[in-house]
Image (spheres, helix red, strand yellow):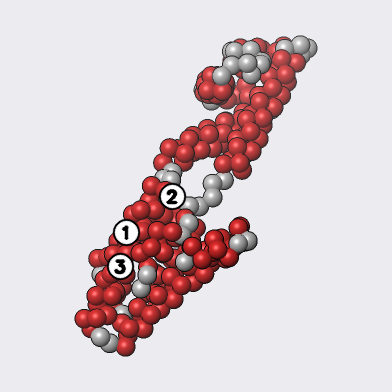
Amino acid sequence: MNYKSKTNRINNESGAILALRIIDTVTKSGISDAQTSKSFTQLVDVNSRYQVAIEPGNNEQVKIAIKEMFNTRATLFSGMHSYIEGMLNSPDAEMKEVAKLLFDQINKYGKNFSNLKIADQSLRYIRIIEGLKKPEYEIPLMRAGLTEKAALLDQVQLGYEDLYMGRGNTSATKVAPSSLRKELNNSIKLYIDEVNWMTNRMDTEEWHTLRYSLQKRFDEVSVSTKKQTTNSTATPTTTATTK
């Protein structure tokens, strides 16, 4: 079984497919010893980490969502600021007092601070929202009809932070496939070595069938790789070197 050289030559995606097919073949074999061995357990563990590593990122979608949250937050804040500022001119003395109290808090840093760093902008929103959540602002917000708007601004701010921080955490913890590829290759080779040894030792139809089936898994990946090379080079000589 020329599995060692083939394991090293296939690309990351083919390596992921090969590992999945090996695990599936062994699982369906019905051979308990093949499914519970230490090397198989190790292969399953490495494969689970490798499959996560090769998943395509959704960075672009996350960026769009973060930008939408960023703009929504700014729009909500600007609308509330303008509304409260307009209330300062109310002919109703009570409403004017309500407006003064709310405006002192919402205008704490002015209406527009988009020229600041993103982190500094977020901090200012947080401080403003924290102030509006104090007990003394509950009734003024209600009288101004802004209770739901203030709650929505808080919700959007929290959502923005979750997305922004989540993207950073994902980037920090994501493992590159290349760093796991050698470990996956070694796990595959180790397990196939064990299957060969067990097949020779047990010499049963079940084990011979399993070894043959695993050989077919390698053949399938090899054919797939050869087709990719043929398509990219269109020269039969190059294809021959990939066998």
Q: Nearer the viewer, residue 213 or 68?
A: 213
Asked if residue 62 lies left or right of residue 143, the reply is left
Q: Is residue 158 visible?
A: no
Asked if residue 151 lies left or right of residue 88, the reply is left
The residue to which callout 1 is attached is 186
Q: Earlier in the sequence, mark 2 or mark 3?
A: 2
Residue 132 pos. (x, y %): 56, 22
Among the 4 quarters of the image, the one containing residue 237: bottom right
Q: Nearer the viewer, residue 199 or 172?
A: 199
Q: Amino acid at mark 3?
A: Tyr
Q: CA distance from mark 1 to mark 3?
A: 9 Å
The residue to which callout 3 is attached is 191
- 2 and 3 marks in contact (CB < 8 Å): no
Residue 224 pos. (x, y %): 53, 67
Q: Is residue 133 visible?
A: yes
Q: CA distance from mark 2 to mark 3?
A: 20 Å
Say what secondary structure mark 2 lies in.
helix
Q: Residue at x 41, y 41 (%)?
A: 173
Disc 2 crowd, CA 10 A, few/some/many (<14, 14-19, 20+)? some
Compared with residue 139, is residue 55 higher up or lower down, i.e. above or below? below
